[in-house]
Image: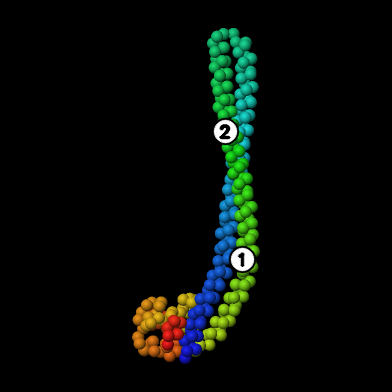
Amino acid sequence: MAATRSGVSELHSLYAKLRTVQNQLQSAPRQMKARQQITAAKQVEIDATKEKIKKLKLSADQSNLQVKTNEAKVLGLKSKLNQAVSNREFDALRSQIEADEMANSVLEDEILAAFEKLDRLKEELTQFERELVTLKAAETKLAQELADAEAGLKAKAVEYERFIKQAESVIPGDIELAYRRMVQAQGPDAFAEVEGNQCQNCFVTLPPQTLVELKAGKIMFCKSCSKLMHIAARDDRDD
């Protein structure tokens, strides 16, 4: 009967190992997606910075064109100033010239600030592009690592499934259907260790007769949580 007891414990262990491998296989696409999202976010940052540079250049060019337009206008006004026929006309022209020169001064300050900002944005862009190269390299490396690991993990899963089929020989026919339904739905969670006199899934105290039957090798489900019980390995060694 010891073989039956250890067989259920072995099934529990094998299903736990199989789940670990399956989780690793399932996590690979999530890891890859997370890495790709980081790379994509950096690309978005780069594209946004390029758009800022483009708009800032356009704005600076427009301001520069306005400065040249105003300068030409001022030259024209100064020419008219010399031809003014009255003080009123002279003062009006002079006021307009001063206003246009003031506007140009503001525009020139704005252009200077724009070029300073452009320099900062270009430095940021260069840094972002370096970071993107690093991120892409990390993405490529992860993809290769996951691909290399996948074959080994799949082989392990097949091996554990083969071991499980062999270990299932301890399951009696009268409970096989219930057993298969549980392990298909729950995997290792279909099992529960028994330590002392308690089911370690629901912590219900088991009747003495149930403990006797379990230790004698009878395969039983917990009446409280319906898990397939087996004596914990440390308790099994103590018997």
Q: Quadrant of residue 212?
A: bottom left
Nearer-N-terminus badge (1/2)? 2
Residue 207 placement, left or right of 39: left
Q: Is residue 224 above or below residue 80?
A: below
Residue shown at 58% from the left, 76% from the top: 157
* x and y, in percent, of residue 237 in the image: 45, 85
> Which residue carries the number 1 mark?
146
Residue shown at 41% from the left, 81% from the top: 194
* x and y, in percent, of residue 214 in the image: 42, 87
Note whether residue 180 is visible: no
Q: What element carries label 1?
A: helix
> Which residue carries the number 2 mark?
113
Q: Quadrant of residue 204?
A: bottom left
Q: In which quarter of the image is the C terminus?
A: bottom left
User: Dot 1: within a 10 Å radius of its alpha carbon, few (fewer than 14), some, or many (20 or more) residues?
Assistant: some
Number of marks drawn: 2
User: How far is the residue under mark 1 from the one under mark 2?
Assistant: 49 Å
- The disc labelled 1 sits on which kind of residue? Leu
Note whether residue 204 is visible: yes
Residue most toward the front?
238
Q: In this view, does 64 lie above or below 132?
A: above
- The disc labelled 2 sits on which kind of residue? Ala
* x and y, in percent, of residue 193 in the image: 43, 80
User: Dot 2: within a 10 Å radius of its alpha carbon, few (fewer than 14), some, or many (20 or more) residues?
Assistant: few
Residue shown at 35% from the left, 86% from the top: 207
* x and y, in percent, of residue 18 in the image: 54, 75
Residue shown at 59% from the left, 31% from the top: 112
